Amino acid sequence: MTSGSHSPRGSYMLTAKHEVYTVATKTQFHQRIKGSLQETEDWWCLVVEDDGTTCVEHEWSHVDPYGKRAPRAGTQRIPVDDFLAGDHDTAAKDNLAELLKKSERG
């Protein structure tokens, strides 16, 4: 810096924080899109947490194209065994079972 010049920099203090972030992997194994305007969408993913626990994440977005009902959207996590044994989309359950078989072989 030359004499008489002005620095736009202020003084900053950096504080180190130790935070632990969990990392999950998601593998989409099924999707269902219904309606002529594709207004009803559902997605299913197998989630494997960094500690090895698994669950199914079901995400949905259902919109009434005529505006008579409020849009519905959300996400739900379900333990894998509960998903396979429960009253859930049959094709999604079949796709999950196939994915689990492949991962056991792999």
Image (cartoon, rainbow, N blue to C red):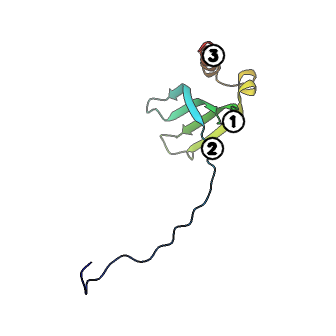
Quadrant holding the C terminus: top right
- Judging by the rendered image, the residue that carries numbered circle 2 is 22
98 vs 72: above or below? above
Task: Give the Cα separation between the discs numbered 1 and 2.
Answer: 9 Å
Residue at left offset 50%, top offset 45%: 67
Is 45 left, or right, of 5 in this rendering? Answer: right
Other residues around mark 3 within 10 Å, as few (<14) / some (14–19) / many (≥20): some
According to the picture, the residue beneath numbered tag 1 turns out to be: 51
Residue 43 horizontal/vertical position (percent): 56, 31
Q: Which residue is mark 3?
A: 94
Look at 48% across and 42% down and name the residue there.
Answer: 66
Q: Where is residue 52 shown, x and y percent of the image? A: 68, 31
Percent from the top left, x then y, of residue 59? Answer: 59, 36
Residue 6: image location, x then y, percent: 29, 82
Q: Quadrant of the N terminus?
A: bottom left
Mark 1: amino acid:
Asp
Residue at the image position 69 percent from the left and 35 percent from the top: 51
Could you give the CA–CA distance between mark 1 and mark 3, rounded to whole angstroms? 25 Å
Viewer-nearest of labels 1 and 3?
1
